[in-house]
Amino acid sequence: MPGAGGTQRLPRLIPLGIALDMLFSAKRIDAHEAYHLGLISKVVPLAQLMSEAHQIAEQICQNAPLAVRGVKEAALRGLELQLRDGIALESLIAQQLMQSEDAN
């Protein structure tokens, strides 16, 4: 049986039938299949892994820090809400950000 909440997380990330197939069979997948299922956002050769990770981190760091934090909060907390409530949360966070030092 998968640990770390695997039986709960995987069916929330990919189609239920595929998740159950993976969970019941203990099937492992490669990076390309994980990308195809939407479990990861990019596949790069191992030799380029750290340079790609640094490039992504630098791109994120070019954005306003409070805005990045707000996006993360809205996206993650919004998953637990109805769409209407998630949009309201996003609006509230955006209003707070517009009054922050990041807005200038």
Image: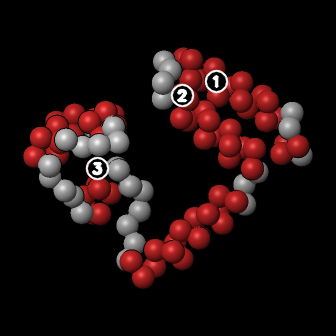
Quick one: label 3, few (<14), some, or many (20+) residues within 10 Å?
Answer: some
Residue at x 75% of width, y 50% of height: 65
Say if mark 1 contacts mark 2, CB within 8 Å: yes
Q: Earlier in the sequence, mark 3 or mark 2?
A: 3
Residue 78's disc number: 2
> Could you give the CA–CA distance between mark 3 and mark 2, rounded to whole angstroms?
22 Å
Question: Residue 69 placed where, x, y %?
Answer: 68, 43
Residue 20's disc number: none
The residue indicated by pointer 3 is 37
Question: Residue 25 placed where, x, y %?
Answer: 10, 46
The residue indicated by pointer 1 is 89
**Vertical side of 60 occupied by 49: above or below:** below
Q: Is residue 61 left or right of residue 82?
A: right
Quadrant position of residue 72: top right
Q: At numbered mark 3, what does the secondary structure look like: helix, strand or loop?
A: helix
Quick one: label 1, few (<14), some, or many (20+) residues within 10 Å?
Answer: some
In depth, the one of 2 and 82 nearer the eye is: 2
Residue at x 55% of width, y 29% of height: 77
| Amino acid marked by disc 2 | Gly
Residue at x 19% of width, y 56% of height: 28
Q: At numbered mark 1, what does the secondary structure look like: helix, strand or loop?
A: helix
In depth, the one of 82 and 8 nearer the eye is: 8
| Amino acid marked by disc 1 | Leu
Quadrant position of residue 85: top right
| Amino acid marked by disc 3 | Leu
**Vertical side of 39 occupied by 72: above or below:** above
